[in-house]
Image (cartoon, rainbow, N blue to C red):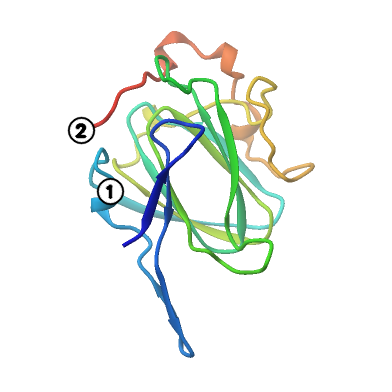
Amino acid sequence: MAKLTESNLIKGVLHVEPVVHGDERGFFVETYRREWFPFGREMLQGNRGDRAAGCLVGLHYHLHQADYWYVPYGTARVVLHDLRQGSPTNGVTECFDLGVNADGKNEHHGVFIPPGVAHGFASLTDMTITYLVDSYYNAADELGVAWNDPEINADWGVTDPILSKRDQSNPERSELGQQWQPHFALRT
């Protein structure tokens, strides 16, 4: 059984340390199991992204969708920021690496990101990220906040990142309209 730990910084974010089974042939790891997330919903869509070193994706957030991220190849610097009004951790930023650690070993950790928590990653190396989502793609629920917002103060681990046009034009947190403000709620 995987070890699940709630973030000590952002309420509702769960860090996952799965059990890795290995021998001379290689390894096997169960990267996701629905029963690990009591307040989550069924994951409906799986996605994969491959990025070259130096790319930055984010910060994105959803009012209704949760994500589960896993990095099978390379290293991603993950940045999370709680945007949820009423959350005990509103305004908190968390940064950590997923994938291959400083010792060159992939620990196979994952992270569950609830709705309303802005999320992004920088590729510290060439990398692959997989993410499961609990609702189908909905353009109206694809929102963003500036990756370099000084209020968020993220440590991305890269200089001069390669960004999409979308991510270059996201507003700062203080510029988000009331209709785009997520609210804190435990999911059942």
Please identify the quarter of the rendering in which residue 101 is found: bottom right
29 vs 83: above or below: below
Label 1: which residue? 43
Residue at the farthest left position: 188
Residue at the farthest bottom position: 24
67 vs 114: above or below: below
Which amino acid, mark 2? Thr
**Residue 170 placed where, x, y %?**
59, 25
| Position of residue 89 in the picture relative to residue 157 (left or right) | left
Which amino acid, mark 1? Met
128 vs 184: above or below: below
Residues 139 and 21: in front is 21
Residues 166 and 183: in front is 183
Residue at the farthest right position: 159
Q: Name the mark nearer the viewer: 2 or 1.
A: 2
**Residue 48 placed where, x, y %?**
46, 57
Tell me whether the residue at label 2 lies in contact with that at label 1, contact meaning CB atoms closer than 8 angstroms: no
| Position of residue 52 in the picture relative to residue 133 (left or right) | right
Which of marks 1 and 2 precedes in the sequence?
Answer: 1
The residue lying at 25 percent from left, 52 percent from top is: 34
Label 2: which residue? 188
Q: How many marks?
A: 2
> Dot 1: few (<14), some (14–19), or many (≥20) neighbours within 10 Å?
some
> Dot 2: few (<14), some (14–19), or many (≥20) neighbours within 10 Å?
few
> Which quadrant is home to the C terminus?
top left
Q: CA distance from mark 2 to mark 1?
A: 14 Å
The residue tagged with tag 2: helix, strand or loop? Answer: loop
**Residue 147 placed where, x, y %?**
64, 31
